[in-house]
Amino acid sequence: MNAIEMVNSFLSLLPQAESAQATDNRYGFYFPLEIKGKPEEAELLLYLRDFEEEVVKRRIEAVKTFAQSVEAAYPGGKVTVNVKKQYCNMLQHLRKAPEVTALLEEAIRESGIEPQTEIVRGGTDGARLSELGIPTPNVFAGGFNFHSRKEWVPLPAMVRATQTVINLS
């Protein structure tokens, strides 16, 4: 039994049509983030992303099923699934405090920009803060190609984002 081969088998069970690169907008995904290991023991860090909590729960159950399949294919091998919640969809919290979003939209307009509401496929500090009872919508940064080696922000966008934060104070 080789733990690295077991991780490989597990990864092959993830639906390719539900990977980050194959999905967009409001469609969630499975995202393998890190693999560590040696033949005796390996560890996989896998993010499950979705906008709806029920779909996340379904993905967790699918991961547990994939783990059972790998265990069955590798007699003597053991797969352990540990689930750790990172954050939830902030929208449910922001809906309870619409005045917060209204203040942000006003501050954006005062900086000379018409607000645009867009979904974010990933975690933000605001998601965690909102979950803790501090409604925190995202303030734009004006960036492009987020989380890539080609991520960048034009200076005029930084200036407008800074002005928006000043307008909020």
Image (spheres, grey):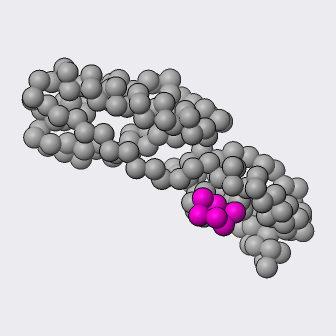
Residue 76 locus on image (x, y percent): 9, 29
Task: Tell me the quarter of the picture where residue 37 sits.
Answer: top left
**Main SS of the magenta segment?**
loop
Range of residues picked out in magenta: 130-135
In the picture shown, does residue 86 fall above or below 132? Answer: above
User: What quarter of the picture does the N terminus occupy?
Assistant: top left
Relative placement, left or right, of 78 versus 124 is: left
From where the camera sits, is residue 160 visible? no
Residue 145 locus on image (x, y percent): 60, 49
* Residue 133 part of the magenta segment: yes
Task: Tell me the quarter of the picture where residue 133 sits.
Answer: bottom right
Relative placement, left or right, of 68 versus 156 is: left
Residue 163 locus on image (x, y percent): 79, 73
| Residue at (48, 53) in percent of width and height | 86
Front residue of 152 and 130: 130
From where the camera sits, is residue 161 visible? yes
| Residue at (60, 44) in percent of width and height | 121
Relative placement, left or right, of 145 versus 39 is: right
Task: Tell me the quarter of the picture where residue 66 sits.
Answer: top left
Front residue of 165 and 78: 78
User: What quarter of the picture does the C terminus occupy?
Assistant: bottom right
| Residue at (11, 38) in percent of width and height | 39
In the picture shown, does residue 5 fall above or below 122? Answer: above
Count numbered badges in the picture.
Answer: 0
Residue 165 locus on image (x, y percent): 75, 73
* Residue 11 part of the magenta segment: no
